[in-house]
Image (cartoon, rainbow, N blue to C red):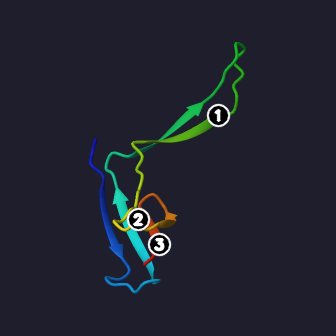
Amino acid sequence: MATPTLTASLNASTYSPGDQMTLTVSYADADTRPLTVTIVVTDAQGNSSAPVRVAAVIDPLTVTVTDDSGRAWSRMSDNGAVAVYRAVA
């Protein structure tokens, strides 16, 4: 299994108490793979159902954000490659 990669940046390098902090995290994993399973049911007379598809991800990624002050970070968006979090300084 490949090791996930990430980069992260804050919208500023210094904050006053009460300022909004925005953290952008870009992440990837070379061996994360989407998978689609297609199922068809056929009876003894050869009649078949319409195909049904189910999606899954092999080796999914999870982003966790913490800091050493115990501040709560809220996820604002996450498209599977870039996640944006916010907290108050």
Residue 43 location in percent, x, y?
70, 17
Q: Is residue 33 above or below residue 48?
A: below
Direction from residue 67 to residue 74 in the image, left or right: right
In the rendered structure, which disc, 2 or 3, sits on the residue that comes first in sequence? 2
User: Label 1, label 2: how many angstroms apart (C-alpha)?
Assistant: 48 Å
Query: What kind of residue is marked 2?
Result: Gly
Quadrant showing the C terminus? bottom left
Residue extending furthest toward the top:
44
Image marks 1 and 2: residues in contact by CB distance under 8 Å = no
Corner quadrant of residue 54? top right
Direction from residue 78 to residue 67 in the image, left or right: left
Q: Residue at point 30% right, 66% down? A: 7
Query: What kind of residue is marked 1?
Result: Pro
Q: Which residue is mark 2?
A: 70
- What label sits on residue 86 in the rendered view? 3
How many labels, in total? 3
Quadrant showing the N terminus? top left
Residue 60 location in percent, x, y?
42, 46
Corner quadrant of residue 19? bottom left
Crowding around mark 3 (Cα neighbors within 10 Å: few <14, some 14 to 19, many 20+) is: some
Q: Secondary structure at mark 3?
A: strand
Q: Residue at point 43% right, 76% down? A: 22
Q: Which residue is mark 1?
A: 51
